[in-house]
Amino acid sequence: MPSIFAPPAYTQRVLRRELYLFSLYRLLEASLLALIVFGPGEALIGEPRDAALATAACLAYVPAAILLLVWSRRTDTRMSEVALVGVSADVVIAALVSHAMPQAVPGVALMLVFNLGAAALFLRLQASLAVAAFASGAMLVEFVWSRLEGPSADRPLAELLMFAFSFFAMVTLTFLLGERLRASQDLADRRGAEAEGLAGINELIIRRMRTGVLMVDGTRAIRLANEAAIQLYGDSEHGLDGRGLAEVSPELAARLSHWLRTGESDDTPMTYGHEKLEVQPRFTRLFNDSDTVLVFLDDTSLVSRRAESLTLSAMGRFSASLAHEIRNPLAAINYSVQLLEESPALPESDRRLVEIIHQQCQRTNAIIESVLGLARRERAMGEQLELVAFVRRFVDEFTRLMSPENGQVRAAGRERPLTGVFDPGHLHQVLTILVQNALTYGRLPGEPARITVAAQEREGRPAVEVVDRGPGVPDAIAAQLGRPFFTTSEHGTGLGLYIARELCRSNGARLDYVPVPAGGACFRVTFSGRNPLLARDGT
């Protein structure tokens, strides 16, 4: 299967560097030849046969070596052309120097063997063999030329044959070795690129994991933290790398120390962040004998939300079937109340009770419809409501049905009209839930509850607030408000605030808990906005 990672273009870069070194070596050879020719050459190799030819070859070779060095540095040239031209010049100069200075023939031949082998790294096998044949032919021409000049230049033919064999053997072995090295280097670079790519993918996966990951070294310093861990600790700007674990989370550092000492992990969830996420830490060593520890921070609240979603889905189906069962006796009660209301024998003192029963039957039916609509995610039928008058009507109706011993509920807030968009039945149900909760939890020991329902304008938006003068809500409980099935009462279901929040959400509003500095609690329903054309006070 082909690799998904492209191999790096190492070949051009490495071979061009080798070509430059080869050209630099050629310049060194030319300099050595110039030293021999223009220096004390007789003391080194004896008197040359043709000093003029040696001088001409030297004067031609040094500039050629410099030009080839400059040519090899250009990136727009083909390396095979530079190598072929350079080794051809080497062969010609070697033949001329061998004829001009017969005593230097073995040394020149050895140097030429290296040049031929180096050139084979940049040429194809056919071209390399052709260059070896050219060098053998040049040495043969020089051998015949020397034999024709006289017996003083007589050299054995076996020397020429050994030179030719060395040329062919060197270019062949160098070419094969170069192919093997290039293939090995290409494979190594390809594997390196794949490993680097896989490491990058692994790092990306770790950084994008929803599970927080911390890598802590033996000094309890954080060496790596993924995005989930950074967001969990609320330091996305500066990151966590290099910081001490005890500085970031003393509780987590204490649990890590306990795990390192005893090998036992505390599975109790910890609470982090503004959203009070429940996180369960897990520890594992990076290696068996390593002090580096990986800390996995599992978000247990995600599992809880999924469980809640499944539970609420089941509750929605259950409430749909239950609503149909409740409607039948409710309809019978409502019909019986209507018949009782039409009875002429009904005393006037009991007609008010019949009216209350009839109103509560209608309200119960409206609540059933709201719960069903919530389960089916039906859209709310929003209307333009005058909130000040709505709040007053709600308080009057609620106080008529409430026992005075339970406390006091009063309407407050502004006197001028305030318009908001909300389903009236939904708003009535939301306020009922909030006031009932305030009566239950918003009272000081031994004192009656004092509840205020007020229509206000907050940050340019209409709002309705339910405020009590009780002990308030602790921070640990405030983070759980609105979660389904969460309750601090053994008789509660934990669905009241959840239904109120979902009803507000379906109407485009928001339900927030606001602590009261002087003591007590405030639940604020902030509407999505109001129509300025319907505002009567000009504000």
Image (cartoon, rainbow, N blue to C red):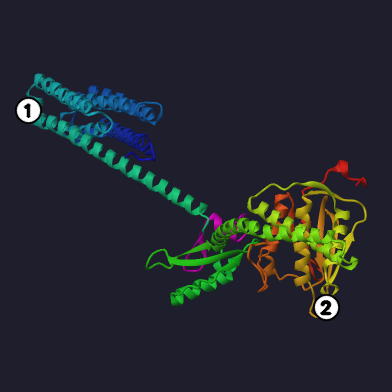
Position of 262 compared to 475: left or right? left
Where 511 sits versus 245, above or below?
above
What kind of residue is marked 2?
A: Glu
Where 10 sits versus 523, above or below?
above
Given residues 330 and 98, the one toward you in this image is 330
Is 223 covered by the magenta stretch?
yes
- Residue at 53% in and 66% down: 280
In which quadrant will I find the N terminus?
top left
Give the class, few, some or many, for how many residues have Cα within 10 Å of label 1's Cα (few <14, many ≥20): few
Residue indicated by mark 1: 157
* Earlier sequence position, callout 2 versus callout 1: 1
Q: Nearer the viewer, mark 2 or mark 1?
A: 2
Q: Label 2's element?
A: loop
Q: Which residues are magenta?
A: 212-238
Residue 447: image tag:
2
Q: Quadrant of residue 278?
A: bottom right
Q: Label 1's element?
A: helix
